[in-house]
Image (spheres, grey):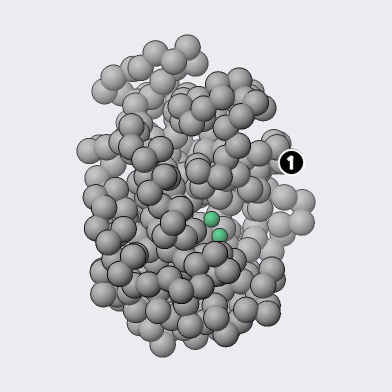
Amino acid sequence: MTYLADSHCHLNSLSLKGKAASSLQGIVARAQSVGVTHMLCVACTPAEYAPMRQAVEPYPGIYTACGVHPLNLEEAPDWQEDELISILQDDRAVALGETGLDYHYAPESRQQQLSSFARQIDLALELKKPLIIHARNAHQDTVSLMRAGNARDVGGVMHCFCDEVEMARQCLDLGFYISFSGIVTFKAGENVREVARYVPLDRMLVETDCPYLAPVPVRGVENEPAFVRYTLEFLAALKGVEAKKLAQLTACNFASLFGIDLDAACLPYLDKQGSQTAGEPLNSYKLEKIQCPL
Ligand SMILES: [Zn+2]
Ligand SMILES: [Zn+2]
């Protein structure tokens, strides 16, 4: 069986109106029809978690995470450890995040971001949950806090990586995985391609970060988990491995990082007509291009 995991998505931020199958069900079905078996759906504030969790309840194979995103600190300036502790008791919740530092969009809140990130690293260690880290234009501070907080004890992922090889090297040294989004397919993404050439296959993840950053050839439309396969195919070509093999490898990385048993809960394969093929989800995995449904 072949698995394919979208290691980072925001299903709750997708606009569910005006689409062919105008619901989360349709989005999940499109992902399933191209072989996506697992997803990690990420909440950016504690308040976002409960409705998101409720929406993904019908889909075993969709896991969850919650943290306080550096760009959402205005909505949750007084977030409390207790809130995240109780959320992360949930059996679907496999990681703390996303957390981190973003000096690209919010350089003015640097101090607040640093303190929030440091507290979340401490909490991840207390809860023994891996971290999902968002870092933009904040290389030195991010790595310094990861080192100072012993983030290597729980590990985690640098999601939607868009920094330089040197930062990737330092994060790999701290035991972290590197996750690639559609940016790797963009014309202006040469620095990310350089990182992708550098990162070993056993430390690589693939993600949509939807609804943002749809990969080429669907760039510009609202992103959704089905499109993770374009990024996967692009990376496979870049690394000189078969896409099917890279799907399997990145899914195994996803499983070992988040402590997931891939067989135990996955989205069953649905063919284009929506019929479920029980037991052998992805034997029919083919690498033809899917039609953009949007
Ligand atoms: Zn992010
Ligand atoms: Zn995100």
Quadrant in the picture for residue 237: top right
Where on the picture, by quarter, is residue 16? Answer: top right
Q: Viewed as shown, does residue 165 lie left or right of 147?
A: right
Q: Position of residue 75 (x, y in %)?
A: 54, 64
Q: Which residue is mark 1?
A: 220
- On screen, 17 above or below 97? above
Q: Check the image and report above or below for 41 versus 61.
A: below
- Residue 221 higher or lower than 98, as above or below: above
Query: Image point 46% across, 53% down: which residue?
Result: 48
Name the one closer to the observer, 65 or 226: 65
Please name the amino acid that badge 1 sits on: Gly
Q: From what the image shows, is residue 227 above or below residue 146?
A: above
How packed is label 1: few (under 14 Cα within 10 Å), some, or many (20 or more)?
few
Q: Residue at x 48, y 50 (%)?
A: 8
Residue beneath the point at 41% across and 20% down: 270
Is residue 283 visible in this depiction of the protein? yes
Q: Confirm if mark 1 falls within 8 A of ligand 2.
A: no
Secondary structure of residue under mark 1:
loop
Q: Position of residue 45 (x, y in %)?
A: 47, 60
Q: Nearer the viewer, residue 59 or 18?
A: 18
Q: Residue 248: in sight, yes or no?
A: no
Q: Quadrant of residue 85?
A: bottom left
- Position of the N terminus, as image quadrant, is top left
Which residue is nearer to you in this view: 106 or 77? 77
Q: Quadrant of the C terminus?
A: top right
Q: Residue at x 65, y 43 (%)?
A: 214
